[in-house]
């Protein structure tokens, strides 16, 4: 095959497993150790000529307690994968132009960020292109009309709005922290005075050495004197909503101040730039969308020209539908406001969260959650006319699993194909070449997998036959179809007399869903391989099932979702009674699922459970929802009818309704009913669900004499991400559940590691009464 060609339709290259027809090794038992050490594959990013794709593979060695990340280059024409780097000091590899690569490296002495350039073909020796005195985030590059390469990133600014390197911060004489307006914490980070802004500069090509070098002028603060930060709060999970082109920088951000405490708002801004060396900054242009709420997102430039697409909420209602906006940044005019409809001309009840342009600018590709999968939809842009308000019908593309990343296969004008990264319950990473429908031809849309990281689950000894999607009647009216995943062990035999215990997994949110996607945290296939039948109900409030179903959790935190979980339990009893032993059932959840675990503990369903697992739950909705990093008047009112206070002149004149739902749906109000053994897990850097919930739930269990265990990670956030910590997490969760349902083998509970074994144990005669 020549460069740029892909395998014929239907052929799969299993780069993640032995190829060439050789047999895979006998599958190992899927254990926590296998999950923790398994290769973790990133998204695949093609270069602009479609010859290569860049991705990383991370592994962990439990014996040496070390991690290793390989930067790999996949030849899309042959499927051959080669390692480009495994230097632990190098990170953030990206394509620069053609086969050129750009990456970052922290300076060993000065803690500055070094920019290195190399080539995928290894035809040039990597060289240092320049240094920036800061830690970089959200890097974007773009080849400009004059041949330079725009280099844009976010990084902190100091009090004078100059670039600041937080790695060089000197230890202050006091540890005091203060806030008067903004949020003190975000996700896992205490917010300080060094807020993130957008910086721009250029890489220039030296005609004599044929090497790129960073402009000596240094990065320029694009937001100087605007009072804006991008993103508004920078933490380990945040990223900037930003796109760059030869016309400048387009971004969306929230305005700091009182508004963020009242309601959600996110405005769209444009900085006109041509050389990306402008020292006199042009005025920042705020783009307003008439007839819509001020909640814009995902600004995305077309590959060429002044057009950019974005999403904007149609109104201020909860879970507002989105309009696709097209703006011409050259004329600063809104060209189109596209409302999405289905084939019946009704409102398209799906909520996109990412946009990709086709090379020729005639199509957009929207990524959106729908029916518990992350899917891609193609939208044809109407012919340009004087009427900017138009309707479009999104068409779903056929891509396996849930899509996590989507790119144009190349930047050639005639290239219509896409490169998608996706996953499923049983396959951690899939790369697919996607051929969408194009105007003027009659070829059928198709998708072909060119890479599977685990050979469709063989690496873990699992397969798609273990996964089933079912529905049962539930929801607010008791008649709405509620989707539920059922996962069974790989040795499940419907003809045998063996019965499996039930594991009910409750997702977070509540406006989220458990999708057919791989996860390293609550991996349902791993739980099933321990001998459980796993049921995962996407209860009322779950997203991807339409606006009304999602909104129905409002003022019903412990109501409709809980009843859907009860109905899930009954469905298993009615339909799997010959194979599932519901007298040996456990329930587990995290975040809102952790709230639900504590809620269930005080409700009738708890009497049917042998044990409960609560990860990062909510014990007291008043203290913890007001104390988290998202407290907002609008959202609290939507959830509980009020923010727990009113505009009454005094508290004794508050109407009873102001606090009624807070108390009705508060787990702490039902402590008297608690009796089920409970494993409680909470981490100290979790600012989304403050760790006081874990300490309080543990104390309540001890005070009531309920068998309990508290697992705490001082260095983890809402998620347990460290490999060794993850192993402890998994072994503790499985061992706890196994203990109460009677599964032998597998992980065992050791004595609590933070308590000495001798404490409270005295030998006869060592203590005598006098």
Image (cartoon, grey):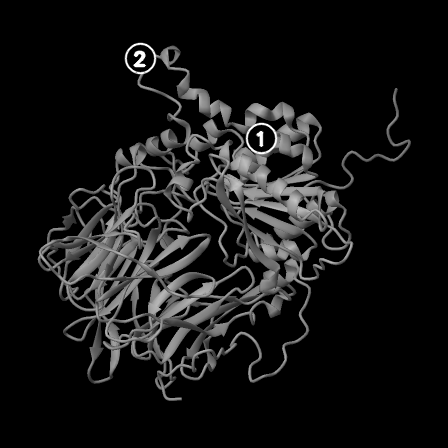
Q: Residues within 10 Å of mark 2 (few under 14, many from 20)?
A: few
Q: Which of 489/153 is in front?
A: 489
**Alpha carbon separation for disc pair 1 and 2:** 33 Å
Does residue 337 appear left or right of residue 134 in this picture? left
Q: State the residue lying farthest toward the right.
A: 765
Answer above or below: position of 239 versus 70: above
Give the mark toward the camera: 1 or 2: 2
Corner quadrant of residue 549: top left
Q: Which residue is painted at 33% across and 70% down in the image?
A: 436
Q: Residues within 10 Å of mark 1 (few under 14, many from 20)?
A: some
Q: State the residue lying farthest toward the top.
A: 652
Does residue 283 appear left or right of residue 28 in this picture? left
Q: Which of 580/543 is in front?
A: 580
Residue 710 appears in the rendering? no
Q: Mark 1 touching mark 2, by CB under 8 A?
A: no
Does residue 629 appear left or right of residue 48 in this picture? right
Answer above or below: position of 159 versus 107: above
Reading the image, the residue beneath label 2 is: 649
Reading the image, the residue beneath label 1 is: 696
Q: Position of residue 509 (x, y in %)?
A: 46, 42
Residue 708 appears in the rendering? yes
Q: Position of residue 234 (x, y in %)?
A: 35, 49
Q: Position of residue 141 (x, y in %)?
A: 26, 67
Q: Secondary structure at mark 1?
A: helix
Does residue 187 appear left or right of residue 196 in this picture? right
Residue 671 numbered mark, or none? none
Q: Split into 4 quadrants, where in the image is the N terminus? A: bottom left
- Sequence-wise, which precedes: disc 1 or disc 2? 2
Q: Which residue is painted at 24% across and 83% down in the image?
A: 210
Q: Which residue is painted at 31% across and 53% down in the image?
A: 342
């Amino acid at each position: 095959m020549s460069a740029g060609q892909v395998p014929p339709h239907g052929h799969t290259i299993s780069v993640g497993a032995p190829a060439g027809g050789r047999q895979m090794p006998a599958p190992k038992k899927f254990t926590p150790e296998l999950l923790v050490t398994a290769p973790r594959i990133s998204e695949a990013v093609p270069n602009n000529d479609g010859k290569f794709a860049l991705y990383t593979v991370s592994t962990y060695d439990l014996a040496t307690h070390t991690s290793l990340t390989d930067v790999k280059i996949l030849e899309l024409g042959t499927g051959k994968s080669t390692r480009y780097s495994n230097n632990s000091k190098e990170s953030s590899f990206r394509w620069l132009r053609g086969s050129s690569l750009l990456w970052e490296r922290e300076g060993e002495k000065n803690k500055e960020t070094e920019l290195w350039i190399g080539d995928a073909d290894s035809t040039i020796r990597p060289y240092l292109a320049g240094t920036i005195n800061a830690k970089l985030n959200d890097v974007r590059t773009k080849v400009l009309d004059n041949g330079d390469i725009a280099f844009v990133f976010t990084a902190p600014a100091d009090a004078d709005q100059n670039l600041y390197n937080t790695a060089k911060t000197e230890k202050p004489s006091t540890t005091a922290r203060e806030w008067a307006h903004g949020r003190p914490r975000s996700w896992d980070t205490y917010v300080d005075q060094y807020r993130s802004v957008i910086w721009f500069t250029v890489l220039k090509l030296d005609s004599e050495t044929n090497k790129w070098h960073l402009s000596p002028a240094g990065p320029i603060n694009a937001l100087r004197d605007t009072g804006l930060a991008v993103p508004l709060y920078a933490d380990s999970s945040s990223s900037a909503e930003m796109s760059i082109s030869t016309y400048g920088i387009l971004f969306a951000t929230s305005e700091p101040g009182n508004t963020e405490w009242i309601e959600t708002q996110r405005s769209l801004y444009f900085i006109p730039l041509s050389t990306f060396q402008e020292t006199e900054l042009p005025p920042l242009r705020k783009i307003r969308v008439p007839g819509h709420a001020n909640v814009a997102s995902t600004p995305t430039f077309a590959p060429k020209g002044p057009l950019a697409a974005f999403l904007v909420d149609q109104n201020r209602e909860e879970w507002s539908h989105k309009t696709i906006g097209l703006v011409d940044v050259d004329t600063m005019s809104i060209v189109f406001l596209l409302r999405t409809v289905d084939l019946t001309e009704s409102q398209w009840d799906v909520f996109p969260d990412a946009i990709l342009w086709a090379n020729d600018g005639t199509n957009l590709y929207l990524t959106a959650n729908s029916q518990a999968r992350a899917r891609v939809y193609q939208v044809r842009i109407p012919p340009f006319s004087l009427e900017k308000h138009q309707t479009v019908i999104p068409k779903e593309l056929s891509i396996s699993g849930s899509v996590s990343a989507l790119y144009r296969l190349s930047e050639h004008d005639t290239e219509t194909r896409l490169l998608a990264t996706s996953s499923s319950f049983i396959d951690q990473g899939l790369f697919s070449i996607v051929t969408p429908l194009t105007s003027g031809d009659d070829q059928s849309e198709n998708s072909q997998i060119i890479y599977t990281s685990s050979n469709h689950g063989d690496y873990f000894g699992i397969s798609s036959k273990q996964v089933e999607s079912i529905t049962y009647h539930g929801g607010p009216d008791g008649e709405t179809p509620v989707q539920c995943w059922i996962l069974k062990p790989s040795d499940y035999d419907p003809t045998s007399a063996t019965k499996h215990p039930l594991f009910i997994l409750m997702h977070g949110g509540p406006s989220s869903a458990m999708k057919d996607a791989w996860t390293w945290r609550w991996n349902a296939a791993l739980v099933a391989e321990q001998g459980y039948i796993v049921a995962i109900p996407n209860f009322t409030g779950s997203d991807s099932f339409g606006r009304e179903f999602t909104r129905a959790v409002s003022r019903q935190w412990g109501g409709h979702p809980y009843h859907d979980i009860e109905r899930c339990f009954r469905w298993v009893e009615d339909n799997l009674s010959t194979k599932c032993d519901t007298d040996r059932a456990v329930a587990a959840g995290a975040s809102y699922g952790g709230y639900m675990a504590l809620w269930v503990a005080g409700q009738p369903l708890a009497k049917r459970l042998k044990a409960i697992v609560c990860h990062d739950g909510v014990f007291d909705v008043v203290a913890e929802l007001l104390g988290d990093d998202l407290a907002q008047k609008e959202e609290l009112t939507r959830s509980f009818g009020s923010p727990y206070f009113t505009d009454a002149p005094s508290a004794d004149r508050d109407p009873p309704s102001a606090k009624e739902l807070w108390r009705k749906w508060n787990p702490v109000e039902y402590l008297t009913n608690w009796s089920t053994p409970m494993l409680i897990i909470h981490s100290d850097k979790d600012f989304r669900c403050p760790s006081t919930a874990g300490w309080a739930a543990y104390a309540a269990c001890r005070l009531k004499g309920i068998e309990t265990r508290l697992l705490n990670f001082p260095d983890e956030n809402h998620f347990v991400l460290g490999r060794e910590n993850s192993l402890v997490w998994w072994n503790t969760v499985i061992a706890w559940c196994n203990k109460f349902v009677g599964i032998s083998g597998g992980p065992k509970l050791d004595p609590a590691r933070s308590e000495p074994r001798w404490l409270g144990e005295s030998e006869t005669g060592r203590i005598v009464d006098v």
